[in-house]
Image (cartoon, helix red, strand yellow):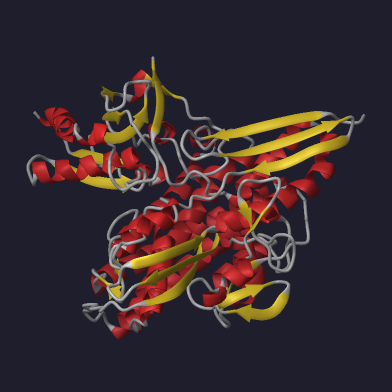
Amino acid sequence: MPESVDINVHHITRVEGHGNIVVKANDGTIKKVEWQVPEAPRFFEAMVRGRSFMDIQTIASRICGICSVTHSLAAIKAIESAMGIQVSEQTDRVRRLLQHSEQLESHSLHVGYLVAPDLLGVPSVVPLVSSHPDVVKTVIRIHRLGNEWMELIGGRMTHPVSIRPGGFGMLPTEDDLRGLRERLEGIVPDLKTLAEVVASLAGELPDFERETEYIALVNPPEYALYHGEIGSTDTNRTVPVDQFESVVNEYVSPQSTSKWTRWHRDSFAVGALARFNLNAEYLTPLAAETAKTLGLQKGCCNPYMNSVAQVVEAVQAVEDGIQLCDELLEAGIEPEKPQVEPRAGEGAGCVEAPRGILFHRYAFDENGLCTSANICIPTGQNHGNIQHDFEALVPQVLPSGQEETERLLKMLVRAYDPCISCSTHYLDVRFE
Amino acid sequence: MGKTLVIGLGNPLMTDEGVGPLLVERLRERMGGAGDCDFVDMGTAGLRVLHTMPGYQRVIFIDCAFMDEPPGALRRFTPREVRSRKERFRMTLHGQDLMETLELARELGERPDEVILFGIEPESTEPGLELSPTLASRTEEYVAAILREFA
């Protein structure tokens, strides 16, 4: 029977716009399929203008609570590029160690608290505490370690305070690193359990594929997260980070108030699956084995598999974290006192945030005061791709009816975990 | 009484959204090392709040809150006294609802014996690094009200 559906899911936030799913179809004819999102917050760029280069990281770390480490790192790299600052190998390693803590924390949070309820058919993680207590406790142990790791290196559980232009204001001790290394080794069995749980439920993920261009950092022979150039699955050519605007090509779409991005096609995707598709051969051994267990193969273009790629990357974060601890301990921690003299200049910084490639650009005058800023967040780069996924998915699933179509569209949005209301928190309550 | 944790929540980039982090720093300065009490600015940490509570008997949250009160109003309440109006579509982990996090902590048996919330009705949550004049002029009053918990 031809289906008629009228889906109108509103993600309401009081402060910062919305992310709506709108689908209308009459007698099997699709009239409207839209992923509606507001313009990404540009307030930050105005806020940092006139501020000292020493203050930028503190402000950048507040853009998003979940990605505060990677916003800090992208900002610091851009500042250092603008001022021609070279950092020590030790600083480079400690920063990468810090970045891994956010990968582990964010991915375990996303898979455990947002995706698992979908796969187990419940509305949120809360009912899973009684129905699947072991799964929830495993996720919580992993997430908790990610947080404590972040606190140890970043100086605070969220919004890190240890990172400075030129180095660190506070470094972990060798005892800290030995303790962390032991805890990272200790979490491996939990990660294996999580991978087994996700593998047993992977059949619940929709079997939907759409040829997609994936974009991520590449830096052979490593699984690039911090260093490298911008790569695409559509070309072997890579682009230096300093030219990121020629990759993202922001443009205004008539059906969205948010800017979309495109490189070789009408849209592209960033995130864990993009990184996997560009860098899978450089995974650490257990992460590669986990990908095999989960049935994830290079070239996968099922967006729902982004969550599976996150499990692989959580393992990668821990394995590479152990390796970085070993390297730092072998070299011994040397005290650093970063002293930076400001100078005029402009520079871009790029890191892989949990949700995908993240760009910051700043210009400074001779006193080190910011004269311009531009940031390009992963969620903004994924919006166009979510719309194109919707357009391909809806005709396939429409015959399954309104409820199922809505469920699959919500799951798709969740797979990308868009950052659309990250800058505010607030309570919204009524008294009883 | 056992150990108390005071958590300030919110974003200092969004005017009155930053009242929680600001007040927690004021309280830290005011209390110094007195009392068996820790202070933490959790910013927009979402579910990370879950990991800060174990080991404390009492947790006090300070947060910007839409409560249908006049701008600047401060209300003290417990989780049992309110219902969240945030939708539960769960599209994203960003903008996580504190009330749901507390529910999860309770289910896990990790919620402290006593949870107290101080909500402050915002005048503005637009981008900006300073509080609105209404809230800025009342910060001492808020600090005094919260300090009464330690009297």
Query: Which residue is more in the foreground, A254 or B116?
Result: A254
**Image position, residue A142 (x, y; %):** 44, 54
Residue at 38% in and 58% down: A60
Residue, far right? A1
Q: Is residue A2 visible?
A: yes
Classify residue A322 by image quadrant: bottom left
Q: Is residue A397 above or below residue A345?
A: above
Instruction: Locate residue A103 relative to residue B139 in the image: left or right.
Output: right
Q: Is residue A51 above or below residue B140?
A: below
Query: Which residue is more in the foreground, A104 or A252?
Result: A252
Looking at the rendered image, the quarter that the C terminus of chain B falls into is top left
Query: Which residue is more in the foreground, B109 or A207?
Result: A207
**Image position, residue A304 (x, y; %):** 68, 52
| Count of numbered labels shown in the rendering | 0
Instruction: Locate residue A221 relative to residue B109 in the image: left or right.
Output: right
Residue at 33% in and 73% down: A365
Query: Which residue is more in the foreground, A72 or A340?
Result: A340
Residue at 53% in and 36% down: A128
**Image position, residue A176 (x, y; %):** 27, 68
**Image position, residue A305 (x, y; %):** 67, 55
Instruction: Locate residue A246 relative to residue B132 in the image: left or right.
Output: right
Q: Is residue A350 above or below residue A45?
A: below
Residue, far top? A432
Residue at 43% in and 67% down: A74
Classify residue A7 by image quadrant: top right
Looking at the rendered image, the quarter that the N terminus of chain B falls into is top left
Q: Is residue A186 visible?
A: no
